[in-house]
Every structure is written in structure tokens, then in C-alpha cells.
Amino acid sequence: MARRDPELYTADDVPLTEIVENAEQIVDYFNNEAEVPFVEIFVDEMDQQTFIQEINENRPDQFEKLSEGEFPGFQNDTSLPNYNELTIRAEEYGKSMGLTQRYIENATSDRVQEKVNEVVEGATETIMDDVFDVIFDSVYDGSGGLWFEIPDYGAYSFDDTHSHQIPDTSALFNDINVPDEGSDGYTAMQHFEAAAEHLRHHGWTSGQKVALVSKDWKFKIKEELTNGADYHIPMAENLRNTEIREMDGATPGGVQLMQSPYLTGDEFMMYDAGIQPVKMYTERELQLTQPQGGPVQHPGDIINGSATMSYGVANTNPLAMVEFEGVDVDWTTSQTRY
């Protein structure tokens, strides 16, 4: 009988060295090459922990009028910095890989590899949950406490009582020029268009508007699409490796629709993907970590080890999204109320 090298083997005689090499390749792919469309749509990844944004300018794209021989100032107010700062707090995340010596010896290499894959996939799930928690928990409600002053835009003036948590149809269409259909009320599609206007009246006119909707809204909007097309409204939580812009999805009024289990009944959320208010700072990428801490250096380090990462997510602009709470919805008579 051939003598084996003195190292740990799985039940089907695959050395632990090979398992760890494969695991490190998976982690490297996750950190550097894996496509995550939901991050590209909803998140702006930062390379610094302190977020700096100039926000006091009404129209920062416009030039100022100069007199002959005059030069523009570096900033309007030389006594104070013309920007605010927000520090994104990073948190530590970890999950045990469940690879004890006994488990490795008793399981096949395929099963051990599946355990590694499950842990890495869990990293994606964790990031997605944090991103959606930030989106749904941080829409501005007009109660004050914003970290910046809301700039005016065009004919619109705002103060810190300006809320983007909109309770019902009446409040949604207030000051929004979307014609109704007489006594029949508003359609589901018009609700999306009105919500998008609540973003555009801040000057955000060019970015892709994404609506996260409940299953009820999904059925309502499909009822209104009478051209016979079978539109697919994807689940936002399924955007791990499929780019939504490549899907044959419904886009009423130019708004991209995605279903989310975070929403029920007549709720929906409108998000400006051009602004990408959710910022993510990664302090340490996903790594295989040995039990006593520090990255895995040798195959044996993975025994009782874990996968860890450190990052922070923050919503830097709670006005770049609109939450329609659906307390009272003025549907057309042809619509079914769920």
C-alpha cells in the first residue's frame, strides 16, 4: 500500500491542500471578479471611510457671472468649508466554515467544497441584506436631523420638514403635474410617475429611477399593460449575477420595476440609481480566517476557521428615494384593490 503524505485527507482521499487552494480561488474571485449587479445599481463603493460631498451649492454645474478682470473664487464662502463630511462606520462580519478535522475526514471533497461555497454565498446575502436595510430604514421623514441643508431647485424651495415618506395618493400627487382620469382616480403607472417627480424636483433628472414594489403592485401594473407583452418584473434579491438592464422588464414612465419581499400591500419605494445615495466602505475584503485570528496561511489553518470581512454601509442622502406607504390609494374603478 502506497504511503500517503502526512496531511489531512477527505473521505475520498482528496488532500486538504487542494481544498484550501480552491477555497482561496473562490474568495479571490468574490473579491475581485464576481459581478454583483445589485451593488452596481444601489451602491456607490467608496475607497475612503470619510465621505465628503459638496452639497451647499444650488446648481454646482452652472458658472457664475464675472466682471472684467475678475476671477472666480475657490468657493463662495471662504470662512467655512463648502462641504460636509460623514464617516461610514465599518463593522466586522464572520461565519464559521464548520470544517472540523472529523468533518473533513468523514465527508467527500465535493461536500467540503460545497461548505466553502455556502459560506462565500452567505457573504453576498449579508451585504444584500445590509444594503436593503439601509434603503428601507432611512428615507427622510421631515423630522429634522439631516446632516446637510436641503438646497432649493428651480421654483421649488425646501426646508428640513420636507418629507419623502409619502402616506397616500393625495400627498403623492400634491404639486405634481400628472393628470388624473377624472373621477376614476389615478392608475398604478401614474403613481410611479408621480413618485419619480418627487426626485426630479430636487434636480435629479437624468439618473435611472428604480421602483421596488410589492407583489400586489406587480399584479396591478401588469393589469395596466394592455399591449399583450408578458413583462417580467424580477425579484431585486435575485440580482446576484444577472444584469437587470438585460432583462425584458416593465419600465412604466421610464421607471425600472423590481419586486421586493420587504414590501407588502400598497407600498412601493422609488430609488434614484444615478445618485446612488447608499455608500459602502470596505475596510477588509472577504478572507479565510484561522481560529486564532489572521488570514489562513497554511492548509491546517482552515480547520475550525471562518470567513470574515469588515465593511460599512450608510445612506448619505435620504432624499434620493421616495417611500409610498399606501395608507390610502386612489385607484381607477377598473383596478382591483388587494
Image (cartoon, helix red, strand yellow):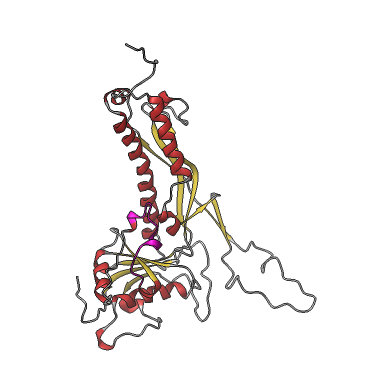
* Image position of 6 (left or right of 70): left
Q: Is residue 246 magenta?
A: yes
Residue at the spot x=40%, y=60% of the render? 138
Where residue 216 sits: x, y (%)? 24, 67
Where residue 32 sits: x, y (%)? 48, 44
Residue at the spot x=25%, y=85% of the render? 184
Q: Which residue is most to the front?
A: 1
Q: Is residue 75 visible?
A: yes
- Give the quadrant of the N terminus: top left
Task: Give the quadrant of residue 39.
Answer: bottom left
Q: Taking 210 as reference, is 300 above or below it?
A: above
Residue at the spot x=49%, y=79% of the render? 156
Task: Give the quadrant of residue 246.
Answer: bottom left
Where residue 98 sits: x, y (%)? 32, 31
Task: Give the quadrant of residue 248.
Answer: bottom left
* Image position of 90 (left or right of 56): left
Majority secondary structure in the magenta region:
loop
Where residue 219 sits: x, y (%)? 24, 69
**Between 115 and 272, the one nearer to me in the picture:** 115
Residue at the spot x=30%, y=23% of the render? 105
Tell me where the magenta segment starts and ends, as one range.
237-251
Q: Is residue 88 magenta?
A: no
Q: Taking 293 as reference, is 52 above or below it?
A: below
